[in-house]
Image: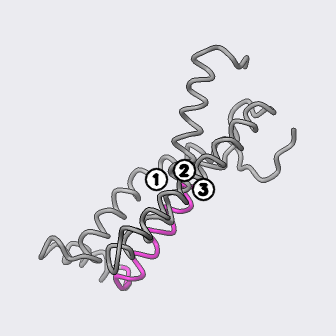
């Protein structure tokens, strides 16, 4: 089955290389800039900001953009052997991730209010992709471990 919407397999490695540092940066940035939980840490981005002449919002936009791109690369890159069964596992994982993501969103709508809901919705943007990546990789691992898929 020809899947034109998938990136080449090498993009998955690029995605992981970008994801790890930018996920850490986004968590750090969210804690220090958005909520100001840790006083005095906001100055950490000072030299970077003055060197690049970027504001906090521009730095945040760059971090979140690269995080999004890395998750898309991880989620939608071909496997080394992309066949119809892998495509089925991919589709099943995507449906599962969508259902779980929206179930969690409904629970959040009922239980969270004001800024708590806002922060949840900011994180919820990535929930679908993260759940898909986790479910798909677990399904592939189980499939390959059981020997149910010949490569």
Q: Is residue 88 left or right of residue 142?
A: right
**Which residue was labeled with disc 1?**
19
Q: How far separated are the C-alphas under marks 2 and 1? A: 6 Å
Q: Is residue 17 left or right of residue 45?
A: right
**Which residue was labeled with disc 3?**
72
Which of labels 3 and 2 is toward the front? Answer: 3
**Which residue was labeled with disc 2?**
15
Disc 2 vs disc 1: Cβ atoms closer than 8 Å? yes
Depth check, front residue: 104 or 52: 104
Residue 15 in picture, x, y percent from top left: 54, 50
The magenta stretch is 52-72
Which badge, 1 or 3, is on the more N-terminal residue? 1
Which element carries disc 2, helix, strand or loop? helix
Image quadrant occupied by the N terminus:
top right
Depth check, front residue: 44 or 137: 137
Which element carries disc 1, helix, strand or loop? helix
The image quadrant of residue 128 is bottom right
Residue sitting farthest toward the front: 110
Which element carries disc 3, helix, strand or loop? helix
Depth check, front residue: 54 or 93: 93
Q: Is residue 139 left or right of residue 44?
A: right
Please say which color scheme the image uses.
Answer: one colour
Disc 3 vs disc 2: Cβ atoms closer than 8 Å? yes
Residue 111 in picture, x, y percent from top left: 36, 67
Q: Which residue is drawn at the image coordinates 31% and 80% (left, top)?
A: 49
């Amino acid at each position: 089955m020809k899947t034109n919407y998938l990136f080449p397999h090498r993009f998955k490695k690029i995605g992981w290389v970008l994801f790890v540092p930018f996920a850490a940066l986004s968590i750090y940035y969210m804690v220090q800039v958005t909520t100001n939980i840790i006083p005095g840490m906001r100055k950490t981005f000072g030299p970077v900001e003055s060197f690049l002449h970027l504001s906090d919002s521009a730095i945040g936009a760059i971090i979140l953009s690269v995080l999004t791109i890395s998750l898309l690369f991880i989620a939608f890159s071909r496997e080394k052997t992309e066949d119809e069964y892998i495509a089925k596992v991919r589709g099943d994982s995507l449906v599962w991730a969508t259902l779980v993501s929206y179930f969690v969103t409904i629970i959040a709508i009922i239980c969270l209010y004001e800024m708590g809901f806002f922060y949840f919705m900011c994180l919820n943007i990535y929930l679908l992709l993260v759940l898909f990546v986790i479910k798909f990789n677990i399904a592939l691992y189980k499939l390959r471990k059981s020997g149910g898929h010949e490569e």
